[in-house]
Amino acid sequence: MNAGITLSQLIFPWVKLSNIAIGNLPVHRIELDSRKVMQGDTFIALIGHCIDARKFIPNAIYAGATIVLAQSNFMMHGKINYFSGIPIIYIKRLNICLSELAGRLYHNKSNILIGITGTNGKTTISQLIAQWLGLLGKRAAVMGTIGNGFLNDLKEVNNTTSNAIDIQRTLSTLEKHGTEYTALELSSHGLVQGRVRSLKFAIGIFSNLSHDHLDYHSSMQEYKEAKFSLFVEHDCQLAVINADDKSGADWLIKLPNALAVSLSSKSILTPNSIFAKLIQYFEDGIKVSFSGKYGNGELLVPLIGRFNAENILLAFSSLLMLGFDKQKLLESAPKLLPIIGRMELFKAKGNPKIIVDYAHTPDGLKQALLALRVHYSGKLWLIFGCSGERDKSKRSMMAKVAEKYADKIILTDDNPRSESPDSIITDILKGLEYPLAVHIEHNRYKAISFALNFASKEDIIFLAGKGHETHQVFKNSKIYYSDRESARKLLGIK
């Protein structure tokens, strides 16, 4: 159990408690989900984007909560009510100060934090950094889409950026296990909702910005500002920015001390930069020859695609900025491993190659398909779908990308959730000029089998959308399913 602090120590100066007895109540554990509350917990009741957790205060108290902190308006701020003898303290903007509150209870003093934001590439960059640090003898962890923890022991999570309490609690636990560095994926939701508001980032990395999450943000401008907030509204000491991205190029003007990273010297207008002079593509990897602030060199890595050249250069540049030796980084680069479910290659003699990736945005899909064109010469088969209860405007856009860059298209289910799988497919078809040319198979396993039966051994079958995921979510069920396992089974890989 956490050593704990008093309630007064937790919520001062937001609320100054005059009642000494209440102020001295012990706080050992705080919890946002009333279903996870245990005896002696402090329940935090926030007004969420979809759910007002204050209506679950009775549930939390029945489960054993001994204190409740509830988000309020200005009129209720500082007031105390009681339910079954349990104090409920109302605090304005509790969602914004929650990160600092959690940090007071769950300490994180020596863990050096690296924040990565952007639409695509966050997982790859964070895991490359953690791998690289490990090769250099450092104890490193990640927090993001695939999971939280050390790379050989990731704990599954529901969101790219966890809630403010879980982030602080996880960082504290990682530090107790000897973590020296943690690379965190920072979603736009996590940034604007204050989930990492009180964290101190040694460095922040921006990968790219493209159409996504407009079911949450009202416009692309709002989405862009959410990402930019890492560098101007959070405690972020150093910045590494992708200069090839239009938003990144704009931000470099506002962030004069940031390190600009580019795959071309044409995008670089500052000496504070690292850029690629030449990129060579091989069937199982890439070589990036670079120049700039830290001199010249060559990065040879077992990754596929131009966008991974971008990812590796961003990760490399960040570690250089943090003071790591360039030569040691270059020597260890070939030992880096591909990220699971991120342009992951599966092959068996006499069969088409299968690539599994998490691409689920129009730009992510485009970049992945373009990357495969560079590495392989056969026909490109694309199997994809779109998630239910997510940004519907992406569906027709992804269809247009698929039709332009793939040779064969098979539409299938992703995570339909409560939406009808047929209606999702219909939305995708609206973006196609030749909808009758596509094959529709709702079952992902059967869709892959269909492609293998008709593709030649020189072809590539690209499975987009699910990547590392091991479940499919339907209206009334969540079933076990993995594109990676399906690829192995159908190719006969043990």
Image (cartoon, grey):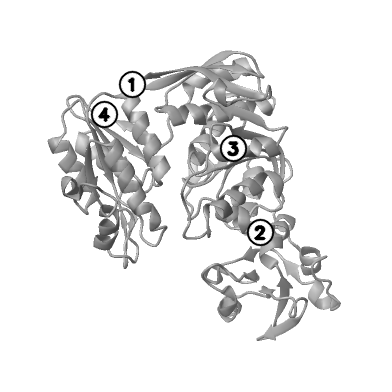
The answer to whether marks 4 and 1 mark residues whose Cβ atoms lie closer than 8 Å is: no
The mark nearer the N terminus, 1 or 3, is 3
- Residue type, numbered disc 3: Gly
The answer to whether marks 4 and 2 mark residues whose Cβ atoms lie closer than 8 Å is: no
**Which mark, residue 1?**
2
Mark 1, residues whose alpha carbon is within 10 Å: few (<14), some, or many (≥20)? few
Which residue is label 3 attached to?
248
Which is more toward the observer, 404 or 151?
404
- Residue type, numbered disc 2: Met
Secondary structure at numbered mark 2: loop
Report x, y in % for residue 440: 19, 51
The mark nearer the N terminus, 4 or 1, is 1
Secondary structure at numbered mark 4: loop
Secondary structure at numbered mark 3: helix
The answer to whether marks 1 and 3 mark residues whose Cβ atoms lie closer than 8 Å is: no
Q: Does the image show residue 291?
A: yes
**Which mark, residue 283?**
1
Residue occupying image coordinates x 43% and y 21%? 286
Which residue is label 4 attached to?
347
Residue occupying image coordinates x 34% and y 34%? 369
Distance between the alpha carbons at the discs numbered 1 and 3: 30 Å
